[in-house]
Amino acid sequence: MNRRIVVLSLVVLLVSSALVASAAEKPAPPKMKPALVVMDVQNVWLPYMDEKDKKVGMDMINHVIALFRDNGFPVIRVYHTEPGEGPAPGTEAFEFPKTVAVRDDDPKIVKNYGNAFKKTDLDKVLREKGVNTVFLAGLSAVGCVLATYQGGDDLDYNVFMVKHALISHDATLTKSVYDICSTISYGPLKLLLETARAQ
């Protein structure tokens, strides 16, 4: 009987040691390295957007920009222009309203396609900053933001829409985007960024 107990104890010890060693060998999941991408909040497009979306969205965009700055994470500006049609860079129509809290030293991407990753340096800029998680704000929720969401996912970024920081021509359609995409609201985003900063 004693011999069986000794053998059983040895087996348990060996299995436990193997499980501990196996758990120790697993690499830790990568730390979240976030960036905020603020898209196409340009004077030329804003008049076409739903007033309900603009009222909430413009305020939330600034709150989210401040949240990223307060936690030391990058804010990327994205602008859209149609070749030969405009708006031309450097014109008032091309610029963000002065009420949007972007800065001249925020990286700036100019795109000609809906997907901000297509034929731009956005992927390069994000990778140089070590970013693996992209949060999207701006317009249009049903156009360029949605295309960029899919483009980021195709490039293996973790991508999230920031709830109430998106604007489109129809607030009902904006809500549909929140329903079909990974979204995050301000409170959980704040907690997530504070946790990421502390890592």
Image (cartoon, helix red, strand yellow):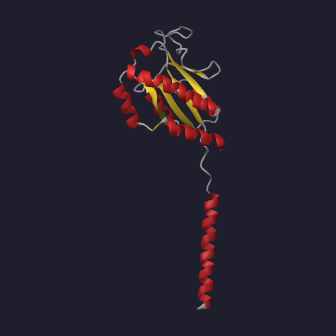
Q: Which quadrant is the C terminus positioned in?
A: top right
Displayed quadrant of residue 169: top left
Residue placed furthest toward the left: 172
Percent from the top left, x then y, of residue 157?
54, 37
Displayed quadrant of residue 22: bottom right
Percent from the top left, x then y, of residue 32?
59, 41
Q: Is residue 79 above or below residue 33?
A: above
Can residue 99 be seen here?
yes
In the image, 158: left or right of 48? right
Percent from the top left, x then y, of residue 187?
51, 38
Foreground residue, 160 or 162? 162
Foreground residue, 160 or 68? 68
Can residue 118 be seen here?
no
Residue placed furthest toward the bottom: 1
Residue at the (58%, 91%) spot, across then down: 1
Foreground residue, 192 or 180? 192
In the image, 112: left or right of 105? left
Residue at the (37%, 31%) spot, across then down: 175
Residue at the (38%, 28%) spot, across then down: 174
Please give the count of numbered marks on the rendered protein. Answer: 0
Displayed quadrant of residue 99: top right
Residue at the (56%, 30%) spot, across then down: 36
